[in-house]
Amino acid sequence: MLTLVTYPPAFGQPSGSPFCVKALYLLNLSGLPWQRKDTGDPRNWPKGKLPALWVDDEIIGDSDNIRMWLEEHGATFDDGLSDLDRATSRAFIRMAEEHMYFHIVLDRWGNKFVWPIVRDTYFAEIPSLLRSFITRGLRKMLLRGMDAQGLGRLTAGERLDRIEPDLQAITNRLWQGPFLFGAKPTAADASIAAMLGAMAATPGGTALSRRVKEDEILVTYVNRVATALG
Ligand SMILES: N[C@@H](CCC(=O)N[C@@H](CS)C(=O)NCC(=O)O)C(=O)O
């Protein structure tokens, strides 16, 4: 049996991590039987990150590696897509995971009003008296990384302007069909819908969560993917 190791559900999403949501969408899309194991502590898993797929004595870390493993074992995620669509799909996945994701990180870890809610959800296992002290260093390190990456230096308004063309690109594809590449969900939907779902679900009403939640096309799409793959 395949076991997907994930962070627990949070903020109404199947997991607090959009990468875990992506992985569970891919597993459901693969049609293979699988089970889920939740943990709040990534330290013992590959690269200290989740999701991870546990198969007998093998552990596959990283949602992209999980996708590759599933494909090597018979799953097909992009059936019927042309080479051109497959190329676009790859670019959309990178847009979701290497750009959109970091907006979620900044919304959740960088916003001083949102952070206490996120901290008390992600780190609920740490006794409340110690929680703030223990997580302070972690937050500082993560925000330093976002500063080095560059997005962390933008104001909230500048960040919203930066992500708008991504949201437009997604919307433009959704004018063409219910999923990004037509009538059926494919791998790109797993990544894009997981990120949009996480953006909308961020607590505290940030500018980005409002932008996504108030967009009927995006919200309907996120719900459609959750129904198809959740
Ligand atoms: N590229 C990885 C990214 C996974 C990832 O960034 N996971 C985050 C949660 S969203 C994590 O476990 N972070 C723990 C840490 O960095 O300490 C994937 O696709 O699985």
Image: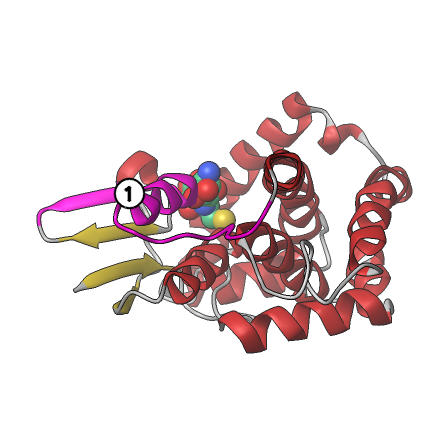
| Any part of residue 110 in sight | yes
Q: Residue at x 81, y 59 (%)?
A: 176
Q: In this rendering, is residue 199 above or below 83? A: below
State how many labels appear: 1
Given residues 136 and 1, the one toward you in this image is 1
Q: Amino acid at mark 1?
A: Glu
- Residue in view at x 63 percent, y 59 percent: 193
Q: Is residue 59 magenta?
A: yes
- Asked if one can make out residue 12 in the rendered structure from this viewpoint, the answer is no
| Residue 192 placement (x, y as % from top left) | 64, 53
**Residue shown at the point (71%, 51%) measured from the top left:** 107
Question: Where does the image place residue 93, in percent across and percent down from the top left?
Answer: 60, 42
Residue sitting nearer the eye, 211 or 230: 230
Quadrant, the N terminus: bottom left
Q: Is residue 2 above or below residue 219?
A: above
Quickly name the residue at label 1.
Answer: 72
- Badge 1 marks a residue whose secondary structure is helix
Q: How is the image coloured?
A: secondary structure
Is ligand 1 within 8 Å of the beta carbon of the residue shown at mark 1? no
Q: Quadrant of residue 213?
A: bottom right
Classed neighbour count for the residue bearing mark 1: other residues with Cα under 10 Å, few (<14), some (14–19), many (≥20): few
Locate residue 211: give its quadrant.
bottom right
Ligand 1 picture quarter: top left
Q: Tell me if residue 45 comes above or below residue 126 in the rendering.
A: above
User: Viewed as shown, does residue 4 lie left or right of 148?
Assistant: left
Asked whether, in this view, residue 208 is left or right of residue 14, the answer is right
Where does residue 31 sit, x and y in percent of width and height? Answer: 35, 67
Q: Residue furthest top?
A: 148
* Stretch in magenta: 57-81
Q: Position of residue 173 (x, y in %)?
A: 79, 52
Q: Residue at x 37, y 51 (%)?
A: 51
